[in-house]
Amino acid sequence: MKLIFNTRTFWEEPPRARHQLARSLAKQGIEIFFIAKNKKGKKNITFNEVEKNIFLIQPSWYFLAVIIYRIPIINEIYQVWLFKNIRKKIGNYVVVNFDPSAWLLFKYFKNVIYFCNDNFLAVKRAKSYIVVLYHFFTQKLVIKNSVFNCGVSIYLYDYLKKYNPNSHLFLTAAPDLNYNFLKHNEIKDKCTVVYVGWLAKIDIELLQGLAVESEKFRIIIVGPGEELLKDKFSSFSNIEFHGEKRGDELYSLLESSDVAIAPYIIDDDVENVYTMPNKFWLYLAFGLSIVTRKIKNLYHLPEKFVYQAYDVRGFVDNVFRACRENSTQVIKERISFAKNNTWEHRGREFINLINKYIG
């Protein structure tokens, strides 16, 4: 089987659902042609095998990708050029589409699957009401015309099935790790707390409330955008900014931690969209308890896995509680839960859906 992944991201970015699903399918023998976000330059398309069974399609075009995406007429001119040339060079394979504006795919490819992993109709993503309106109509066409759709949250799934009954809730998953390791709970004078993710999503008040407890917590912050926060935390001696980490460096920091946090700002994502944030799977894979903002539609996880809070005091109290209630037994339960929900499992589920609808 061969699949084309149509995305608006670079292959080299921190792994997201499209990268993780692509790797999972590639490990199962499926060839993936991964269309990346374009680079600015002369019109050109290059093909390179970046991993076994994964071929990177790297377009270059006259405008930056951010400009293309936000100006509808340019976006459609670009898509016609891109899809026409890829169809000519590769053939009419099944397309897994992550772009809500790519309605022109159906002109060139017979079987398209829409994988919706974000609320693309939010103004904060589109930066313009005109673009939101454009995405509303193009995404509607994409949903209706796709063979089937996958949404990574209850909110997105409900939206998809309004326009196409062949829609499925398809949660993200835990990384494919060597789960033979067993993390044990150790009594420590200072609890190590870790956050992994985009720093723009952090509620500063929640993090400051935690940092004040300098005698009790060591706080590790991992992710891009540390310049947004460093000045606000320069007076705290117990908070460390490690920048963007991947692979063994990231895993080492997680293995040394006791509690993971997700101090989200209050926005539409937290109120309505989130069901099982991708970082939660990463945390559980390392046996970590999670302390987060109250998430209304959170996937049904035991309280000993996730502690939710409404405010700063509740958030800090829950970190204390998570440290206190940690045990080797519950750590094993979290790791076991993650082990049974890896991207390898999701890859098999995805193949089953393709076989069901396309064959």
Image (cartoon, rainbow, N blue to C red):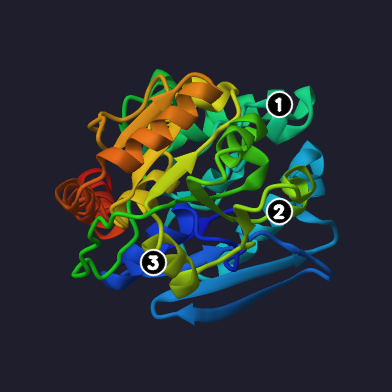
> Which circle marks residue 226 in the picture?
2
Q: Position of residue 130 (x, y in %)?
A: 78, 25
Q: Earlier in the sequence, mark 1 or mark 2?
A: 1
Q: Is residue 65 left or right of residue 321?
A: right
Q: CA distance from mark 3 to mark 2?
A: 28 Å
- Quarter-of-image position of residue 201: top right
Residue 80 point in image, percent of width and height:
68, 52
**Label 3 residue SS:** helix
Q: Is residue 136 visible?
A: yes
In this orientation, which residue lies closer to the viewer: 323 or 340? 323
Amino acid at the residue labelled 2:
Glu
Residue 213 percent location from the top left of the image? 55, 39
First in sequence, mark 3 or 1: give its number: 3
User: Which dot, 1 or 2, sits closer to the camera?
Assistant: 2
- Give the crowd class for mark 1: few <14, some 14-19, many >=20 residues within 10 Å: some
Spatial separation of the CA atoms under disc 1 and disc 2: 24 Å
Q: Quadrant of the N terminus?
A: bottom left
